Amino acid sequence: MKIGQKIGERSVEIIKSSEFTEYLAEKVHQTSDPDETFGQKLSSALITMGIVKPDEQQLSYEKWYSFTRGGAEVYVAAAQVILEKKGKIEARPFVAKAIIAGNESMKQTLERRTMLASFNILVPDLQFYQRYEN
């Protein structure tokens, strides 16, 4: 599915989307303009999460896979954005990880990251953390 969404003066091509993309656009974005397009909401979410910097132009977005079970209490999703900054094009893949069991699981995950880093084991940067409750 290809959908062109205008963001600013240019359009972002949404190559493939899913419920993961909808989650980003509807739950993560930080703006409240009721006239925003889906693409503008997605762009806002990617900036909020630190995946895209405000001075980078988003050219396309492609969902690789939606949330898939990655462990007992973990789901992972992956996507890629194509960006332009100062005339250079860059592909930036990213992974989102959802922990469904609550604070204790998140605390353990953060402690595990710290421990691994203390042994000079590379861990991905944590760009964004958001908590939801029912």
Image (cartoon, rainbow, N blue to C red):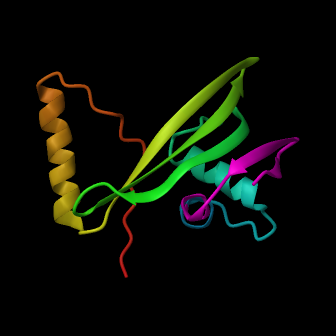
Q: Nearer the viewer, residue 129 or 22?
A: 22
Is 31 positioned to the left or the right of 121 in the image? right
From the viewer's perspective, is residue 108 above or below residue 57? Answer: below
Give the quadrant of the N terminus.
Answer: bottom right
Q: Is residue 58 found inside the magenta-colored segment of the image?
A: no
* Residue 125 place in picture, x, y as percent: 36, 35
* Residue 70 place in picture, x, y as percent: 31, 54
Residue 3 in view of the camera: yes
**Residue stretch in magenta:** 1-23
* Residue 88 place in picture, x, y as percent: 71, 17
**Residue found farthest to the right:** 9
Q: Residue at x 72, y 26 (%)?
A: 84
Which quadrant of the structure image shows residue 102? bottom left
From the viewer's perspective, is residue 85 above or below residue 113? Answer: above
Q: Residue at x 24, y 69 (%)?
A: 101
Q: Residue at x 67, y 49 (%)?
A: 43
Q: Nearer the viewer, residue 54 or 15?
A: 15
Is 124 positioned to the left or the right of 87 in the image? left
* Residue 73 place in picture, x, y as percent: 25, 63
Q: Nearer the viewer, residue 17 or 123?
A: 17
From the viewer's perspective, is residue 33 above or below residue 2? Answer: below
Q: Is residue 2 found inside the magenta-colored segment of the image?
A: yes
Q: Residue at x 37, y 82 (%)?
A: 134
Looking at the image, how many numbered discs can be counted on the residues? 0
Residue 55 in view of the camera: no
